[in-house]
Image (cartoon, helix red, strand yellow):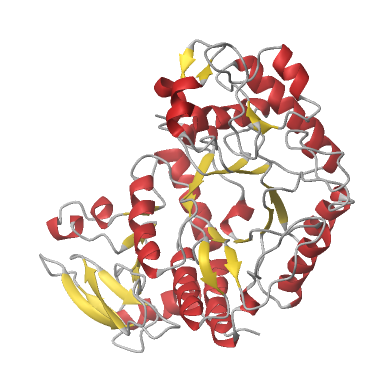
Amino acid sequence: TGYPPVYPYFTTGFWQSKNRYRNQTQLLDVARGYIERGYPLALMVIDYHSWDDPSGRTYLGDELLAKPCWPDPKAMVKELQDMGVELMISPYFHSLSQKSRFYEPAESQKLLATNSSGQPVMSGFSDAFIYDLYQPASRKFAWEAVENGYIRQYGMHQNWWVDCNEPCYARDTEIFEQEMVYNRGNWPASFVGAAYPHFVSKMVWEGQRRPDLRENSPVMLARSAWAGSQRFGVSVWSGDTSSNFNSLRQQVRAGLNMAMSGIPYWTTDIGGYQGGNIDDYSFRQLIVRWFQFGAFSPFFRNHGRRGANHIDAADECGSTNGSNEIWNFGQEAEEFIAIMMRIREQLRPYVMEQYRAASERAEPIIRPLFYDFWKEDDAAAVEDQFMFGPDYMIAPQLFENATNRTVYLPPGELWVDYFSDGPYIYDTTNKTKGIRVVIPTPLEKFPVFIRAPLHEGENHLDVLQLLRGNRVGVQSPQ
């Protein structure tokens, strides 16, 4: 169904997001906070409702930020870029309010999804209407609105959080499926509706009009996709997950299934999206474990709608929920998360290699053990470990308060235990079957094994020193 493009280098780094940074001052203060503390930061994210304008001049679909809350987006973009930080925005550009300046021309040109009588259906997010993006003319119209707003006026790069792209709709799904029709009334949603996310992505891809898309792809983080959406540069995250260990366990399986479906760029909300209180120790333990998993995911992305013992009250720019920056999770969690952030930072060239392998050879970035060890029947039964590219086997700790876990090591390899205090090396080179080992998992550690075949003239200690000391290094927080 097609090969993905190569994503930009910045996407290999750390993404900071939350529901939600409600204004320009708040977002920039958080970015400065990471930089001033010496933590790596590659991307900041503006979540939804950025179009809500207390002065009533901007609406969903205008493809502009509300000026009272985001007074100088161009300066904001420049300050972030001067810090080495990119900006992503969640514009919901598949939807528009009836008050949007683009609603009347879109309706008159029959560019909106309708019911069987030809009337536009109010079915989108926040009582909005949606573009009929199965039509080429509708895709062109909607994209020009984006280009004339976010891109030309603010100088934003092509980093889009494509949320709610199923699309969001009225809660009565039966009416939605029965009444909505696409392609100028010819295609019922009950027949083609599940492919709508594919055409949202196609709109962005077509809109670039650049000859170098394979090496200069827009970034699209979508909630949903369709078979083949990867060829339009789509990445997917796992949606609004719950903040608990059961949800964390589900993410490993979800990511591996997505990878084996041909979509290599994938991520989660580190910490889960909803139900976590940053002042509870149970959540702080969860988010450390989720950061450990996230550091070895295709994208390393912190996001969620947090609870807290104290939350700032809503103002004219809306609510902001609890804090979601790593220094607000307590000293112990911050220290352990910082270790993972620095490991990921040193891994970025390796991650970029995996992006290229995905683009050139359709190699999944994270993959089940059976992908690399296809001769091993036992490997096919393992669903709580995975390979991160060809060199790293990851076995995250997925249970609360657990102090160890069992790890399966396939045969024919030299496995270096990165975090262990010893033994460091497990040699299965002369074995015909894999082995299982029990590895301690204090909160700051979990099983990371480096696949390290011996070359002529090397010994185990040489390999250990090279891989533990040079390739990836654990550093204490500054």
Tally the marks: 0
Residue at 47% in and 66% down: 243
Q: Quadrant of residue 126?
A: top right
Residue 383 coordinates in the image, percent (x, y): 26, 59
Residue 478 coordinates in the image, percent (x, y): 66, 85
Relative height, residue 122 to residue 284 (above, below)? above
Relative height, residue 173 to residue 453 (above, below)? above
Q: Decide which of 79, 216 is in the foreground and name it.
A: 79
Residue at 63% in and 39% down: 218
Relative height, residue 144 to residue 450 (above, below)? above
Direction left: furthest residue: 432
Residue 241 coordinates in the image, percent (x, y): 46, 57
Which image quarter is the N terminus in? top left
Residue 96 coordinates in the image, percent (x, y): 70, 31
Q: Decide which of 66, 225 is in the foreground and name it.
A: 66
Asked whether residue 457 appears in the rendered view, the answer is: no
Direction bottom: furthest residue: 421
Q: Decide which of 126, 109 is in the foreground and name it.
A: 126
Query: Is 24 left, or right, of 359 in this rendering?
Result: right
Query: Is 252 left, or right, of 359 in this rendering?
Result: left
